[in-house]
Amino acid sequence: MAKRIPKIQSARRIILGIFLVGFTTLAILHQKLQGIPSVDALDPFGGLETLLKWLASGEFVKRITAGNIVLLGAIAVLGVVLSRFYCGWICAFGALQGVFGWLGKKIFKRRFKVPQKLDRVLRYAKYVILVGIIYFTWKTGELIIRPYDPLAAYAHLPSGLSAVWAEFSIGFILLILFMVLSMLYERAFCKYACPLGAINAILSRVPLFRIRRDAPTCISCLKCDRVCPMNINVSKADKIDSSECISCFECVTSCPTKKNTLAATIGNKKVTLKTVVIIGFAIYFGAALIGQALGMLKFTPPTITEIAGTGILKVEDIKGSTTYEELASAFGIDIDKIYREIGIDIRIVPPETKIKDTGALIGNPEFETDTVRMAIAKILGVPYAGESGTALESPQSEPVAEKLETRITAPEPVAPPPEAPAPKPNLKVPEDFALEGTMSIEAVAKALGWSNLQVIEKLGLPSDIPTDKPLREMGSQYGYTMPELKEKIAQ
């Protein structure tokens, strides 16, 4: 007979599931649609990374918004009042670890524990990571954690493994590592590596909330110790004041005495678990309402069109999510001139394409948004040396409104672009090259150093064929066989 899960624990699992599904859905939509917040904007830790810079200059670290500070404020208040309630009830990454922890229980039929001495040492790692992130973010003014963040890697999985590996290779490795570890050691990332968990642990030293143990009614069954996901020795404490407690109440709901041997208290006064949960979410969503009232609850930066409306548009405001038609409209530049300056074909890269998707269409995965910024700067005649250059501290940082005004009111006449010559497919194929059915057009182009269009012409394929799918999967749809393609590539 299956063991019945207490209602409060069922509610916690459902709530965590909602946050995980919601976060995952937003991550998918962000890759597909404009105006959907990125993982950077949804991560409250970004609020700490940018807070000092915002107080000093009124600017945010790149990719961070005012919404991050609101979320950080909510978690700080939660930490003081209810310890690490956020970790146990709201954190989507904690929920993801819970899913893998559940899988681990099913597979291994047991939970493993890190040796106590090693465990005590490893728990300090998250504080070292926190200090390092704050220091280097402050020194560089950049979101230094991003390439190493397993949550960011997870959120970018909808863009494809190749894209994740290109930008988040270390974060992706850490994601796999901690999910595997979570199958063996519950909430491994929370215990040993989470910088936000370190902040919550520091704040949890002064909370009003504690779980207290009534020693006379305790039967020393140790069940509370076994169910604690953070491996706290509940059975030996009069009150649970460990900074690792995530307020999950697993110890309370598993206690078999039915005599309130373990009870939640706020300000030394016993309260029901339901009351604690209500207070926790009231604080979290109350902070969101306050942020909304102050106009700070924004999780997406203004679009380039919105910035253009303020008259302070700069080349640095061009983002990877900007489309070419938005770019032309915002800067008042003829779109054909933009395409010529960048050196791309409008037939291959339509105007509604996001800049960040250009590389996949032209067969050049190393194409960067900064290439477009430099092209626009050249057209406008403003200095810009690129993201790694020094021009960001020069007059480039000033708005280009005056230049834009003349361009928008009286754009210079531009002759239509000459018809682009058809790509020449008769390029030399190395003798050791072997065309395989598992390869996509993009993979063939990369291996040969050609463009996608040149591969399509060489193989005699229709221009609308997908470039990212294996060739063998499209043969029946587009009327070819792999032997035919291998013969054509060899000619």
Image: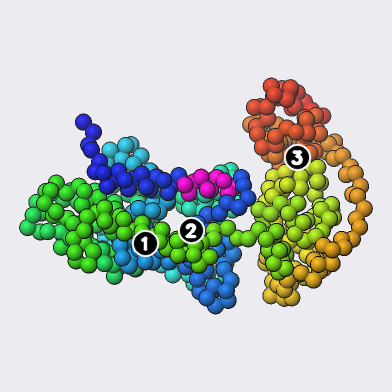
- Label 2 amino acid? Asp
Front residue of this view, candidates 64 and 160: 64
Q: Is residue 290 visible?
A: yes
Which label's residue is closer to the chain start, 3 or 1?
1
Vertical position of residue 189 compared to residue 362: above or below: below
Image-based side of 19 in relation to 456, left or right: left
Which label's residue is closer to the chain start, 3 or 2?
2
Q: Which residue is mark 1?
A: 283
Residue sitting at x 68%, y 30%: 471
Front residue of this view, candidates 490 and 96: 96
Q: CA distance from mark 3 to mark 1?
A: 53 Å
Local crowd size for mark 3, using a 10 Å CA cut-off: few (<14), some (14–19), many (≥20): many
Front residue of this view, candidates 333 and 99: 333
Q: Which residue is mark 3?
A: 452
Point out the frontmost of discs 3 and 2.
Answer: 2
Residue sitting at x 37%, y 47%: 15
Percent x, y of residue 488: 79, 28
Quick one: SS at disc 2?
Answer: loop
Q: CA distance from mark 1 to mark 2?
A: 18 Å
Give the magenta-colored segment's residue range.
Answer: 22-31
Quadrant of res 209: bottom left
- Label 1 amino acid? Ile
